[in-house]
Image: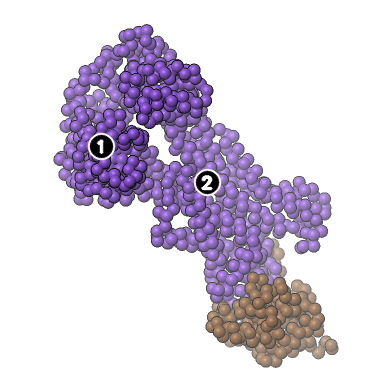
Chain colours: A brown, B purple
Amino acid sequence: MLKIKNLTKLYTTDEVETTALNEITLEIQEGEFVAVMGPSGCGKSTLLNILGLLDNFSEGEYFFGEHEVSKYSERQRARLRKGSIGFVFQSFNLIDELTVFENVELPLLYLKVPSSDRKKRVEEVLERMNIMHRRNHFPQQLSGGQQQRVAVARAIVAKPRLILADEPTGNLDSTNGEEVMKLLSQLNEEGTTIVMVTHSPYDANYAHRIVNLFDGKIVTENIKEQFHI
Amino acid sequence: MLKNYLLVALRNIKKNKLYSFINIFGLTIGLSAGLLIGMYVVDELSYDRFHENVEDIYRISLHGKISGQEIVTSRSSPPIAQALINEAPGVEAATRVRTIGDIVFRNGDDSFVEEQVIYADSNFFEFFTFRLVEGDPHTVLAEPNTVVFTSELANKYFPDGNAIGRFLSVGSQKREYKITGIAEKPPENSHIKFKAILSQRTVESEQFYSGWTNNFLFTYFRKNKNTSIEDIDSRLVEMVQKYVGEELQQFMGVTFEQFLEQGNAYGYISYPMTDTHLRSITDDDMEANGDITYVYIFSGIGLFILFIACINFMNLSTARSAGRAKEVGMRKTFGSYRHTLIGQFLLESILYSIFATVLAIIITYLILPQFNLIAGKNLVFSGFLTPSFFVIMAAVALFVGLLAGSYPAFYLTAFKPAEVLRGKGMAGMKSSAVRSSLVVFQFWVSIVLIICTTVIYKQLSYMQNKNLGLDKQNVLIISSTGKLDSDIMPFKNAIESNSNVVATSFTNNVFPGVNNTTVFKNVLNDQDHLMGSYFADYDHADVLNFEIVEGRFFSRDFPSDSLAVVINEAAVKEFGWEKGVNNEILNFFDDSPAKTKVIGVVKDFNFESLKTNIRPMVINLTNTSNNLLVRYHGDAAEIVSVTETIWKEFAPGEPFEYEFLDQSYDKLFRAEQRLGKLFSMFTVLAIFIASLGLFALSSFMAEQRTKEIGIRKVLGASMGNLTALLSKEFTKLVLISFILAVLPSWYFMGKWLDGFVYRDQMGVWVFFGAGALALTISWLTVSYQALKAAMSNPVDSLKYE
C-alpha cells in the first residue's frame, strides 16, 4: 500500500544541514500494523509526517498505492489526505473551539458528506468510542483518555485506509493507553492499515511488525520476536 | 462548513474577550470616524446638485485689476442678466439674487431681526429647484412688495397657518410686503440659503440697479446643452467692452482700450454652479465656502484612521497566531485546502467587521449632533438612510473585513502542518517585520496628525492674539442706529453718560472687512487708486485705539475736517507719497468728484482677514451712522443690559441688535477653529486606536516572553530593567515613525501656513513635542504590560513555560 524508496529528508538551517532521514526504503502492505520505534530525534515523526503527506522529502520516491506522490501539489496532497488517511497525535490536537461532535465531524465536512449522513456517522463512531455522552463538551472539559478517544474517532470517521498514529499513548496513563491501543488493534483487524510511532515496547507489541530507526536510518525490521512481553 | 467556520469565529470572539473587544472596538471607532468623514465629504460634494440641469447653470464672477489692485468677486452688476438673454445665444434663462443679511420684519407690535433675507427675481422658483409649499412659482415674486417666506418663518409670524395674503413691514423704511408664497426650507447643501425672499421688482427701479460697474448681486444663468461656455464667455467680453466701456468713458473719461492700456483689467467669467461651494476662487460668497483641499485631506484622514484600526486587527491576529496554529495544522491535516482556510479567516474578519459596522452606524447616529457642532454642519442622519447607504455600508464592511483579514489569512494559512504539530512555526511569531512596519505606520499617522493639529492651533492662537493695530477688546457694536432718526445724537449722549462707557463712535462699517472699495485719485497726477473706504465720526480713534503715526484724527475743533480724510500707511505707499498729511485726493461718492485733504495717517491695522496683506484704506468723516461702537470697561453683560435699557427708551418696539468687536473678528478664524477641532478629534481617535493596538500587542509579547522574564528576574533584573527591555522594541518603532513623520508634516503644514500673510513659525519644538507625546503614550501603554510581567512571581512564569 505504501512504498518508499531511498527516501532522504534534509533540514537546512542557515549553515547547518541535518539529515533527518537517510535513504530509507520501506514497504507497508494493506492491512498491516507497523510500529516505528527508535530514540528521540531519530526521524520517526518525520517519517510519519512524510507518509501522511504533511511534509516534503528531499530525495527518493514515495508510492501511495499506485501513485508516486513526490511531485504532488499541495492541493493533490490535501485531496489524498482527506480521503485516505486518518491521524492520531500524542497531544491529541483537537480544535479547542469545537465541541467533541464538531471535532469528529470536521473530516466529513472537508469530504462534503451530506449533513444527515454526517450526523449518523459521527454518532456511530462516538458510540463506538464510548464518548457519545460527551458529544457537546469542549476538549478542555475532557480527560486525556477521553480526548484521545475523540482524536481516534476523528481519525476513523472518514473510514480511511490508513491511520498514522504518532505516539498515541504518550500523554495517557496506562489504563487509557491500553484502551487506545485496543481500539487501534481492533481497527486494524477490521482492515485499516496502521503505522504507529511509539517509544513504548508494550504498545509496539500490538503491531505486526516493528521498524527501528536510528539516526535517520532503518536499522532493524521485523524485530517483534525480540520483545517477550 | 460555513456553520463550522462561524461557530469557530464566534467561539473565538467569546474566548478571547480582550482581544475581541480591542478588535471590534478599534474597528468600530475607525469605522465611525470613517463614516462621519464620509458623510461630511458626501455632503460637501453634494452641494447644489439637487437643482435640475445644474450642470448647465453658471454664475458670473468679476475678475479685474484696477490701479494694480486685484478684484475677484462672485458678485456682478444688475444689467448683465438681461443682456445675456438678449445678446448671448444659448443662454436660456438668467436670474439674480441679492443678499441683504439681517433685516427687521414687523407684524403689528411684534418685530424680529431675520437673517438670510434675499432679494430675488420673479423667475427664481422656475430657475432653481427650490420647492414652494404654497403659491405659484411663476408669479410669487412677479409683483413689487411681495415676499415668500419659508414655512418656518410663516409659522413664526402667523401661527394660525394663514400667512398667504397677509402683510408685514420690512426694514428701517417699514415698507409693506405681502406674503405670496411659502417655500420649503432650502436644503442644507445649498449655497443659496434663505428664510425670506423679497421680490427684486420692489427695488430694481432704484438708480444703482442700472449701473454696469455696480457689482453687488449674484447673477446665475442656464445655458442650452448645445452651447459651449466659451461662446458665452466671449459674449461677456463683448458686453464688457460695450457697456462697461461706456460707463468708464462717462465717469473716468477714458475709453475701455485706454483703461486696459493703463494696466487695468475688467472682465466677467462664468463659473459652474457645481464648483461654487468647493472650488470657489472668491471670498465674498453668500456663506463661507468649503474647500476641495479639505475634502481630500479629510477623506485621507478617514481612510488612514480606518486603516489604523485594520492594522490592529492584522497585528493582533498574527501575534496571536500561536493560538490558531494548531487549528490550522489540524484542518490542513484533515484535508482542508489552503484557499478554504483563507476563506475561513477572511470570513472571520468580515464577521468582526460586520459587528463593528453595525456598532459604528449606531455610534455615528448618536454622536452626529456633536460632530455637527465641531464641523459646522447640519448633517441629518435620516437623510443618509437610503438603499445605497446600506449597500455602501455592506461594501465597506466587506472591504474592511477583507483588508484587515487578508494579511492574517495568508500568514496563518501558510503554516506547514508538520511544523505546527511539531511545535515549530512559532519562532516567526515573536517578531515580524510586517507587524513592525504596521505599527510604524500607525504611529506615523498619529505623529503627523499631532504635528498638524499643533501647527493649526498655534497659527490660530497667533492670529487671535496678534496685535491687530487696534484694540478689539471691550468694544460693543450696536447696529441699526439709523432707526433712531433725530434721536440718534441724544442716544449717543445717553450711552456716554454711563460711567462704564469710555467713548462711543458712529461708523457705517463693522470690522473685520470694509464695506466699500472704490476708486480714489491723486489730485496731482490724476491716477486711479482702488482703496477700501468707510465713514466714521470724530471719536473713532478713541474707541478703536489705533495709533496715529502722522498728523491727527478728525476733530470738532477743525470745521474744515468735513472735507478731510484719514488714511492708513498702506494708502500713503499706494499713492507713492513719502508723507501723507496735506496731500489731496479725489473721491467719487457723489455725482461729481470731491476734493479731500489728508489730515492724518493711521498706523496700518488689520481690518480684514489675516490671510491677506493690509490694503490701502481711507476713513471719511460722518456725524452719525448706522452702527455705534461703544468702548467700555467692566462687565460685558452689564454693558449690554445698560445699553439695551437705553435703546428701549429711544426705540420702543425695535429689536436691540448688538455684537462684540472681538467676537466679530473671531468669525475670521472660524474655518481654522473648525479645522483645528476636527483635526484634534481625529488625532485623538488615531492615537487612541493605535494605543489600543499597542496595548494588546504588548500583552501578547509579554506573554510570549514570560519565561525569559522569569529567568531574567531569577538572575537579578530589576523592574526597571524589565520594563525597559519590553519597551525597547516599541520605542524603536515610535522613533522610526517620528523620523518618517517630520518631513511630510513639515512640508504640508508649510504649504498650509503659506496661505496666511500673517503666519506663525512652526518651531522645532512642535516636532519634538509630537514625537515625545507619541513616545510617552506608547510607553504608558506598554509599561502596564511590562510592569505586570515584571512584578509577577518568577517561579510562576517559569512554571508556566
Towards the viewer: A130 or A209: A130
- Which residue is tagged 1? B177
Q: Earlier in the sequence, mark 2 or mark 1?
A: 1
Percent across and percent down for residue B139 are: 20, 45
Query: Is the residue marked by circle 2 packed among few (<14), some (14-19), or many (20+) residues within 10 Å?
Result: many
Q: Quadrant of residue B714?
A: bottom right
**Closest to the observer, B533 or B251:** B533
Q: Examine the rendered structure and indicate whether residue B284 appears above or below residue B393.
A: above
* In the depicted structure, whether residue B465 falls above or below residue B98: above
Task: Determine which quarter of the picture holds residue B524.
Answer: top left
Q: Are marks 2 and 1 on the same chain?
A: yes
The mark found on residue B297 in the picture is: none
Chain letter for mark 1, please: B
**Residue A70 in view in this figure:** no
Query: Distance of mark 2 from mark 1, alpha carbons?
Result: 49 Å
The N terminus of chain B is located in which quarter?
bottom right
SS of the residue under disc 2: helix
Type of amino acid under label 1: Tyr
The image position of residue B229, as x and y in percent, is 23, 44
Q: Residue at x 71, y 59 (%)?
A: B704
Q: Relative to B633, does residue B798 appear above or below in the rendering?
A: below
Q: Chain of mark 2?
A: B
Of discs 2 and 1, which sits in the foreground?
A: 1
Rendered-image quadrant of the C terminus of chain B: bottom right
Q: Would you place residue A53 above or below residue B609 in this image?
A: below
Q: What amino acid type should be assigned to the residue bearing mark 2?
A: Phe
Residue identifier under label 2: B682
Residue B499, image x, y percentages: 49, 17
Q: Quadrant of residue B141?
A: top left
